[in-house]
Image: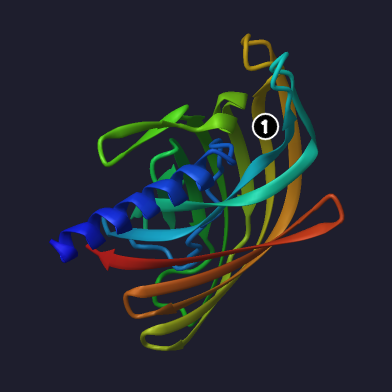
Amino acid sequence: MTNYTLIISYKSRLFILIICLTCMVSCTVTNNLYVNNPNPMGKGNSELYLGIGTGVKAKIDSINNTTGKISFTNKISSAPILSLGAQYGVSNQTDVRFAFHLPYILGGGGLRAGLQHSLMDSSAKMNFAIGFDLGGVISNDSIKIFRSKIPLTDSKATEGGLNADIFIPFGVNLKKDISIILTPRYSFNRIFIRKSLFNHNISNFNFEYPTLSIGIRKRRFYFETTVIYHDRQVFPHFGMVILSKN
């Protein structure tokens, strides 16, 4: 009986904690776990990955309890994401890229797709590529936890978003199973924010920023840190993925 009571108590505390966290957040979150790789897959080859990281979301300053008016001042912040992706070789030096992400694990959904061309083939010790990504994300106004529907207060303030990126990864293979990748990137973003909780009139939050990512690949693991520079501020992002080649 004691163990059962402890389990119930633990679930109750976790339940309350998740409610507190989710009721303070907006769920239109872009995928900033990039999983850069300048080495091409080679025609017909692919690589899958599953990882956790962080993404960018618009920062809602306040919501008036009486009128429902939503206020924001072109600020951004970070949020956790779960990301699933793939890279597939359409030729020896050109790959297509896909990624699907879940903000706050279940707080919406986003899709990103892109194309990358490498200057050298996969056997080169050093490689250099250029590519672009296009993406979009939608928001949920609630999530289900232990079969209960929990509203996400600020997610009602956002109606999704779009992004377009151009990037130039450069990589060095130190050993057979270890490589370091440096990737400058420029990102264009638009998030749709409602003017009020009680109607669907939309304000566009348009923002852009440069980023610099450093990634380390070791066998089946990839670790990435990305620094975003926006509005004279630096926002660090982190991620880790497990890789599977086919």
In the rendered image, residue 11, in percent from the top left (x then y), is placed at 30, 53
In the rendered image, residue 207, in percent from the top left (x then y), is placed at 75, 39
In the visual, does 88 lie left or right of 129?
Answer: left
**Quadrant occupied by the N terminus:** bottom left
View extreme (left): residue: 1
The residue that label 1 is drawn on is 190
In the rendered image, residue 170, in percent from the top left (x then y), is placed at 59, 70
Which quadrant of the view contains residue 47? bottom left
Along the line of sight, which residue is nearer the eye, 200 or 15?
15
**Quadrant occupied by the C terminus:** bottom left
View extreme (right): residue: 232
> Would residue 99 be visible to someone looking at this image?
no
> Is 237 placed above or below 75 here?
below
- For the point 50% across and 42% down, the residue is 22
Marks counted in the figure total 1
User: Which color scheme is applied?
Assistant: rainbow
> Would residue 51 be visible to someone looking at this image?
yes
In the visual, does 149 lie left or right of 228?
Answer: left
Callout 1 crowding tier (Cα within 10 Å): few <14, some 14–19, many ≥20: some
Secondary structure beneath label 1: strand
- For the point 17% across and 65% down, the residue is 3
Q: Which amino acid type corresponds to the residue marked 1 in the rendered image?
A: Arg
- For the point 55% across and 30% down, the residue is 153
Which quadrant of the view contains residue 227? bottom right
> Is 100 placed above or below 89 here?
above
